[in-house]
Image (spheres, rainbow, N blue to C red):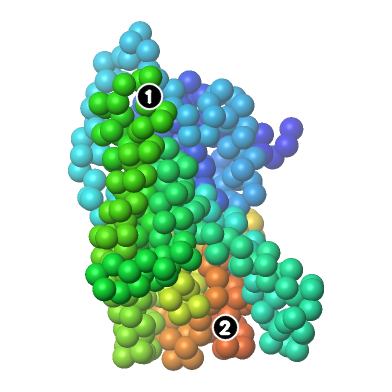
Amino acid sequence: MSKERQLTEGILQHIGGKDNIRRLTHCMTRVRLELKNDERVDLTALKKVNGVMGVIDDDTLQIVVGPGTVNKVAALLSAETGLSLGEEAALSPDEITFREKAELDRMKRKEKNNTPFKNFLRRIANIFIPLIPGLVASGIINGAANFAVNAGADKESTLMQILLLLGGGVFTYLGILVGWNTAKEFGGTPVLGAIAGMFLFNPLLANITIYGEALTPGRGGLFGVIFSAWLMTVVEKQVRKVMPNAVDIIFTPLITVLVVGFVSLYAIQPVAGVLSDGITIGLNSILDFGGAIAGALLAGFFLPLVMVGLHHGLTPIHLELINTYNETALLPILAMAGAGQVGAAIAIYVKTKNKQLRNIIKGALPVGFLGIGEPLLYGVTLPLGRPFITASLGAAIGGAFQAVMHTASSGTGVSGLSLIPLITNNNYLFYFLGLVISYAFGFIFTYMFGFKEEMGENIT
């Protein structure tokens, strides 16, 4: 039996069986389960399943199993339950017990108490998470190609032109992809959302004058696309309510595109332009004037955002910085959070005699070096408590260094050592030194103040 199947069976055993799953999704490292009855879950036993690196009991049950493994486990769970990823199994009336009804009522109250800001970030994350594999692949190709050009390769050669084409394609048409995912996330027709992205990035905008000025293709960036695509879903639903079924396929999309098209050009793009300019200029100003302090605060407080899975909500900010300045200075700073965890985990590995804890660290460290820090976060630093703080302190030192050195990235989707090819202005060495600094201080703070052997007693 494969380790993925053993892991899948272990998960099913401790979540109340396959019939307790209502909805199944996954991201890069976590299997996300919406359950019919949370009381059937044995969280303590689930955390001890071999291969489970952490468990987060939020509005969904999030089981951290690591990159690569998550795809296989999700596919096995899908096969076992008969649920497609993202498909929700309805409760039949004879299945609903008094206890289940009470649980459903509790979930409704929990949803009602969710903060709008937290829900907003979750929505943003859902739009961008499916794009991450493409952003990673294209970003690495683009970064490697530019690295070769900086090293002396002929930019005009056919090979380099092909690599630059392959690396830059997703960023050229990113507005279309974001529009598609936005409409899908809000329950609209995805292609109409994609059209919203085409509106705001179309080169023909330069030929249109509104309010006495020629429009700028791409102004407002992805913020404009998200709002325009969301408006597509709103208008589409409203029009469909009154449109006869016989002509719905013709007139609903036609009216939707016309209405949202004019609103996008006359209202959304100008407003989104001011918003995106404010965010990008504001962030750069904070880093310019705040320097080391700003870098330390941004890196030091990033792990709590990762902890609740909302860090993907920052993706549009990175992409808007890239769209405006051809680089994001924010990403290298935030990448230090993962590096601080790596240093903390190494310190724990050196100090502890707990075999289970050492095995968890051995399994999570390789991907931690490559910038995927969730296995270390949920399997090591967060459960132990104090190492979470010392890892953040190590990250803060590295973040301060990156801010002072003005390192920036031409792409997004990766961090850690994987980000090195994407660093701009030949600052590869400075970025690597920042990683080493975060590793070192994460190690020092954790070794000296962050870990005692008794902390690992509950990890068996």
Q: Secondary structure at mark 1?
A: helix
Mark in the foreground, 1 or 2: 1
Residue 175 as seen in the image, left or right of residue 350: left
Q: What's the CA distance linking mark 1 and mark 2?
A: 53 Å
In the depicted view, which residue is nearer to us: 253 or 452?
253
- Which residue, given by chain and number where applicable, does mark 2 sit on? 424
Q: Which mark is residue 146?
A: none
Q: Out of 318 and 248, give the one closest to the viewer.
A: 248
Q: Amino acid at mark 1?
A: Val
Residue drawn at the location 32% of the way across and 60% of the way down = 265
Can the viewer see residue 376 in this picture?
no
The quadrant where residue 445 appears: bottom left
Q: Is residue 306 left or right of residue 362?
A: left
Q: Residue at x 33, y 15 (%)?
A: 96
Residue under the point 67% across and 79% down: 146
**Would you place residue 265 above or below residue 369 in this image?**
above
Pointers 1 and 2 in contact (C-beta within 8 Å): no
Point out the tag, 1 or 2, that comes first from the N-terminus: 1
Density class for disc 2 (Cα within 10 Å; few <14, some 14-19, many ≥20) is: many
Residue 49 image point, x, y percent = 56, 40
Is residue 265 at least partly visible in the picture? yes
The picture places residue 67, in percent across and down from the top left corner, at: 60, 52
Q: Left of 166 or right of it: where is 289?
A: left
Q: Which residue is mark 1?
A: 247
Residue sitting at x 41%, y 65%? 205
User: Which residue ends up furthest to the top in the rendered image?
Assistant: 94
Q: Position of residue 375 (x, y in %)?
A: 54, 56
Name the one closer to the observer, 240 or 276.
240
The image position of residue 228, as x and y in percent, is 34, 52
